[in-house]
Every structure is written in structure tokens, then in C-alpha cells.
Amino acid sequence: MRAFFSIASLLIVLGVIAVAVKHQLRASRQFLPSANAPSASAASEPFGGASRPNVAQFQRELDRTLKEGMATRASASEDAETSR
């Protein structure tokens, strides 16, 4: 009897997993590109083709922000040193 329940519960678990996988595969098919979808270049640009900043622009902005932060910290630490 114990073996029967073990096999039955295993089959139920496998059935639930199969249904979940089937549902997931069906959902992923909805997002595949179709023939009437916009071209790859237009689809890759966000907001309807607005110009995208490239990695170099992001890097320059990050470097500038870090330098400003370091300068602010340096001036704050100098002020703290002189006030002692």
C-alpha cells in the first residue's frame, strides 16, 4: 500500500510539472517575433526610435559623477580637519 501511494504521488508531481512546463512553453511562443513585427533595428530602439546613448556616454557620465563625488568628499574632509 505504501508503494502504491509513493508511485501515485510521484505521478501527480510529474503531472503538475508537465502542466507547468506546457503552460510556460505556450506563453513563450506568444513573444516570438512574427512576420508582421517591426524590423529588428526599429524594435531594438526604445521609445519609437529615439537615439540611444551608447556605453561610452554612460561611462563618461559615471566617471564625471565619481570625480565630483571624490572632490566633494575631499573638501568635506579638509573642512573637518581644519575645524578640529
Image: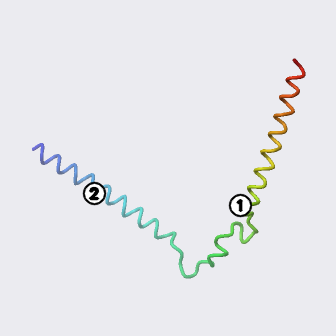
Count of numbered badges drawn on the protein: 2
As drawn, 40 above or below 69: below
Q: Residue placed at 64% from the left, 70% from the top?
A: 44
53 to the left or right of 43 = right
Write down the residue under mark 2. Answer: 15
The quadrant of the image that shows the N terminus is top left
Q: In whole angstroms, how far apart are the C-alphas of marks 1 and 2?
A: 46 Å
**Which residue sits furthest top?**
84
Are circles 1 and 2 on residues that touch, CB within 8 Å? no
Front residue of 66 and 26: 66
Of label 1 and label 2, which has the lower sequence position? 2
The circle drawn on residue 9 is none
Residue 25's x, y, as percent? 41, 65
User: What percent of the width, then of the height, locates residue 74?
Assistant: 83, 34
**Which residue shows up at 79% across the image and 47% down it?**
65
The quarter holding residue 53 reads bottom right
| Circle 2: residue type | Gly
Circle nearer the viewer, 1 or 2:
1
Question: Residue 83 location, x and y as percent?
Answer: 89, 20
Nearest the eye: 59 or 13: 59
Q: How is the image coloured?
A: rainbow
Residue farthest to the bottom? 35
Q: Amino acid at mark 1?
A: Val
Image position, residue 68 (x, y; %): 83, 43
Q: Is residue 6 above or below residue 72?
A: below
Q: Secondary structure at mark 2?
A: helix
Q: Is residue 78 above or below residue 39?
A: above
- 16 vs 9, left or right, is right
Residue marked by disc 1: 55
Residue at horizontal 85 percent and vertical 24 percent from the top: 80
| Viewer-nearest residue: 50 or 16 | 50
